[in-house]
Image: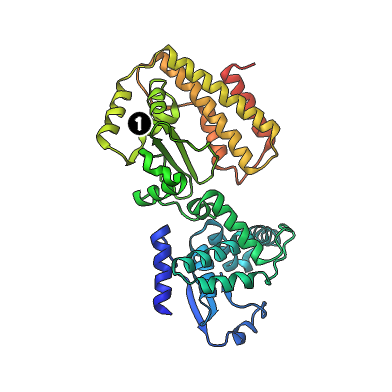
Amino acid sequence: MKTTLMQASEILEDKFKIKPQKTKLYLYDDIQEFLSKTKNPQAQSMFISKDLSAHVPKNRLDLILHEYHGHGLYCEQANYGKQMVLHEQNIDKMSKKQLAEALFIHKHLKPDFEGHALWTEDFVLTQLRRFDILESRLQELNNLSFNSRFHRNLKTYRDIYNRIKQFEQENGIFELWYSLGFPRQFDKQTLFDITKEKLGTRYKNLIFLIHFGSNNQNGDIDLCAILEDNVKLDEYKHSRTIDISQFNYSDFLKRIDLFDIPITQPLLTGNLIYGNKKDFNKLKIKLKNKKPNKRAIAHLHRRSRWCFDYATKYFSNQPITLTNLEITLSNLTYAISFYEFAQRYRNNGRVIAMDELDSQLFKEIRTKLKNIEKEIDISNINHLILKVRELLEYK
């Protein structure tokens, strides 16, 4: 068993660059004596977040993966997991209001907490080729009830498993993992693995892969993929964790001439993850030596107007959700960026990067975007739309 546990940790570390380190594992010949002294004596196994301890029957590899590698890793590394541990450790010092808020968050996020552990079982058992255990476990999940007033459509633990597997199938393993609040990784192998997963077989048509933006482990991963001509591109999809833009090579070159920000930003500030470094540097030098002309400035103004119109229409026509507000604010920042770049290029003959913008409104909206989880103020967003409209002189 010890060897298998080490293999399981190595599988997770190889894929996601993290493994349980603080969690303690307790294996029992007969776990019922321990469980009988807890608030949930009918459980099969148990994880205690207060002291990061996993209590499991020694003959159940699936439950070991669930409690130790699933809940343990989540509480050590995921954003909400770490917060949950702090709540448990400071429960005697919390006010009634704080306790109510903590309980509300926990009940709301419990499908993610349990879903991650179930997914970890599935992922590691599949890698270990222990399909017999996995098949038996999935049958068992059909009979394990789950009750939540926040998620009434989830009746069993199999429903939770199906929910998280559907997200994986639609978005990929890495986006699933990071969406659960785990730290992003920026090593070249991980970035390339993410791209391979997103592109599928089309990664063979990759010319350049560029990573740009910050290396904030709680932010998003910004990637720019340049593919051969006539290769189908994915429609851009908003993501809070992995932002990968795709361009065909000929279009990429045309957009360089137009000083298009989604092209100039990665080319100026990014690191080449894949592709011919000499050719990449030639394009970067070409861009730096090139002067914006009237056609490029007109293009930036059109892009600014398009982003603003998209933001306002989207905000008016979509339900108020965290994702939809992010899309609105993101398009407002692009509307300002395109406008400010066009204005700068009228008076300055050199290409610039985003960090050279000094627009206070741009910074205000970017701050709102970063802190949107903490504060959703619809009236404030309407106010920001009006301020952008005034800046851009749109009627």
Instruction: Residue at 44%, 27% (x, y): give it.
Output: 261
Instruction: Residue at 53%, 61% (x, y): give it.
Output: 82
Packing grade of label 1 (10 A; few <14, some 14-19, many >=20) is: some
**Taking the image as drawn, is residue 353 in sight?**
no
Residue 203: percent from the left, percent from the top? Answer: 39, 43
Q: Quadrant of the C terminus?
A: top right
Q: Nearer the viewer, residue 233 or 63?
A: 233
Residue 28: percent from the left, percent from the top? Answer: 53, 85
Q: Nearer the viewer, residue 373 or 206?
A: 206
Most distant residue in the left direction: 278
Residue type, mark 1 in image:
Leu
Q: Nearer the viewer, residue 75 or 150?
A: 150
Quadrant of the rendered structure where residue 381 is?
A: top right
Q: Which residue is mark 1?
A: 268
Residue 35: percent from the left, percent from the top? Answer: 62, 82
Most distant residue in the front direction: 230
**Taking the image as drawn, is residue 333 in sight?**
yes
| Rendered view: 46 above or below 169 | below
Q: Nearer the viewer, residue 280 or 84?
A: 280
Quadrant of the rendered structure where residue 386 is?
A: top right
Q: Quadrant of the N terminus?
A: bottom left
Instruction: Residue at 57%, 68% (x, y): give it.
Output: 89
| Rendered view: 323 above or below 314 | below
